[in-house]
Image (spheres, helix red, strand yellow):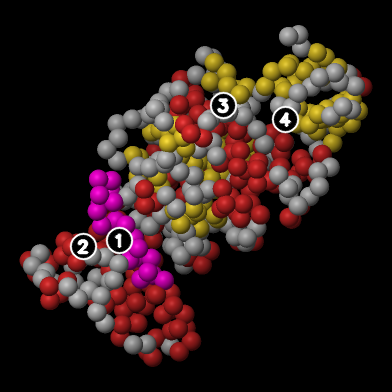
């Protein structure tokens, strides 16, 4: 069908162009705007009614002379170019190159809104992904096909953590290639350079596709970037049979851009000024992760959400938690103590962890050791609070053991180097070393077989450890 051109723009506000007297104009339709200087801008129809068609202009509406602006409706959805050469490239939100290299020679184009997937065709997420970070691998394991967000705050090292996950993530015993799609929204130029230099210096840039939107770019362009990145991820996963890890930072910047556009449109605001459709809009993005039956590839998603004022009940992290399958929460208190990564263990959770760990995956004791560590650390935090009131010298001997455990758990298990890549076996062995600090009656979530095989009582030799008998293992629950 022939594209139609109009010169009926009636207003421009906040990156939006209001068009009147339009015959047609479909939701999601691609639009090209030509200003009075002959320069072209890209746009997309986001609202249509009998009288008004609303176009979001990705390059912004600054300096547009409405009377001399032509708008062409192309009668096609917004698509981005794709090919097997996307790896190692850096693009903006509309698929344009940002790496001083020629535009991508596309073998095909795909709709940024993604292809519809029959829910029955989805496969359940499973298979452990090793990130090399003990607090994640040991206690909040990431599973192939899962969406596991990082809840952070201003000034916390979520960018460093995201870069470390990109460098170190791998599938155990899997020969299929593992690639990364990295989407950065509203980041500063310094942060963008940080990610690019990190990936280049570590040698992983060749397996990474980067989509960048800087803080000074038009906010309206930010709304397209995660969809473009996920369209690329779907191509790599389901057409190229690759395992794809999608890291998106920062979803808070995306939601703020959505609020800005919704305000310009005149939408009725909901909580904290965000539109009422924030939940469904976030779900459109998050739910594109997963696996499809009879396809070797998969999409695993790690979005970063910075919580305004460290408020986990803020609409963005709150709604994200409803859609995704857990969360990794970063602690400002641990960060101030010099602990990296400052993962706050009690509120962190991976709902699909049970499906990716254990025998034939990580190690048979993993589920029970993780449960025991959670229980022991929770008890240790209670003891720490008590000690802050009555003093450590007033604690019982067993409570002092828990108090010592809390400090060593944070300093030895949670804390690790930014370049340190721990294997899951190293993580589990370290967990057993820490559990040896606790009294025997506290180890109620591991089995006698686990104790006999892995646990080393403080001060015992290797020979004594292998000779553990009923007198020692059989009373693990007694007080």
Whether residues under marks 2 and 3 lie with C-beta atoms below 8 angstroms apart, the answer is no
Position in image of residue 22 (x %, y %): 86, 20
Q: Which residue is mark 4?
A: 58
Position in image of residue 81 (x %, y %): 57, 20
Queried whether the magenta region covers residue 315, the answer comes back as no
Q: CA distance from mark 2 to mark 3?
A: 47 Å
Give the secondary structure at mark 3.
loop
Position in image of residue 49 (x %, y %): 84, 29
Queried whether the magenta region covers residue 370, the answer comes back as yes
Q: CA distance from mark 1 to mark 2?
A: 9 Å
Q: Which residue is mark 3?
A: 115
| Disc number lying in front (4 or 3) | 3
Residue 280 lies, with reference to residue 25, above or below; the image says below
Q: Residue 450, labelled with which disc?
A: 2
Tell me the quarter of the picture where residue 72 sits: top right
Q: CA distance from mark 3 to mark 1?
A: 40 Å
Q: Is residue 34 left or right of residue 161?
A: right
Q: CA distance from mark 4 to mark 2?
A: 58 Å
Q: Which residues are magenta?
A: 358-378
* First of labels 1, 2 by sequence position: 1
Q: Which residue is mark 1?
A: 368
At 78% across and 31% down in the image, what residue appears?
A: 47
């Amino acid at each position: 069908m022939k594209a139609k051109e109009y010169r009926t723009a009636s207003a421009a506000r906040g990156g939006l162009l209001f068009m009147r007297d339009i015959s047609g104009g479909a939701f999601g339709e691609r639009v090209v705007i030509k200003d009075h200087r002959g320069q072209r801008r890209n746009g997309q129809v986001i609202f249509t009614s009998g009288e008004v068609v609303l176009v979001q202009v990705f390059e912004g509406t600054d300096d547009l002379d409405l009377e001399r602006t032509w708008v062409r409706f192309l009668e096609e959805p917004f698509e981005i170019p794709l090919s097997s050469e996307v790896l190692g490239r850096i693009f903006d939100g509309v698929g344009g190159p940002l790496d001083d290299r020629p535009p991508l020679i596309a073998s095909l184009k795909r709709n940024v809104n993604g292809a519809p997937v029959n829910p029955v065709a989805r496969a359940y997420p499973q298979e452990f992904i090793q990130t090399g970070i003990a607090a994640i691998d040991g206690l909040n394991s990431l599973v192939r096909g899962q969406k596991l967000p990082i809840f952070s705050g201003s000034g916390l090292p979520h960018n460093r953590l995201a870069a470390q996950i990109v460098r170190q993530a791998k599938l155990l015993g899997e020969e299929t290639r593992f690639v990364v799609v990295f989407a950065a929204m509203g980041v500063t130029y310094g942060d963008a350079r940080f990610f690019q230099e990190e990936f280049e210096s570590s040698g992983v840039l060749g397996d990474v596709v980067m989509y960048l939107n800087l803080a000074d770019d038009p906010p309206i362009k930010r709304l397209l970037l995660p969809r473009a990145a996920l369209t690329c991820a779907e191509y790599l996963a389901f057409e190229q049979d690759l395992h794809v890890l999608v890291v998106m930072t920062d979803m808070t910047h995306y939601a703020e851009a959505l609020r800005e556009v919704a305000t310009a449109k005149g939408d009725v605001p909901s909580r904290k000024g965000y539109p009422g459709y924030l939940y469904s809009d976030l779900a459109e993005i998050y739910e594109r992760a997963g696996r499809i039956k009879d396809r070797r590839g998969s999409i695993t998603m790690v979005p970063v959400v910075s919580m305004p004022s460290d408020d986990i009940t803020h609409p963005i992290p709150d709604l994200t938690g409803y859609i995704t399958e857990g969360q990794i929460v970063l602690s400002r208190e641990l960060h101030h103590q010099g602990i990296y990564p400052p993962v706050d263990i009690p509120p962190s959770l991976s709902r699909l962890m049970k499906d990716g760990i254990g025998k034939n995956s990580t190690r048979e004791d993993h589920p029970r050791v993780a449960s025991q560590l959670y229980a022991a650390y929770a008890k240790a935090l209670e003891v720490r609070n008590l000690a802050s009131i009555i003093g450590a010298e007033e604690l019982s001997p067993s409570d002092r053991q828990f108090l010592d455990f809390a400090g060593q758990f944070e300093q030895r298990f949670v804390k690790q180097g930014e370049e340190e890549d721990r294997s899951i076996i190293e993580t589990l062995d370290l967990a057993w070393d820490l559990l040896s600090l606790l009294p025997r009656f506290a180890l109620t979530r591991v089995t006698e077989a686990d104790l006999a095989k892995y646990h080393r009582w403080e001060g015992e030799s290797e020979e004594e450890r292998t000779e553990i008998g009923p007198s020692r293992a059989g009373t693990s629950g007694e007080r």
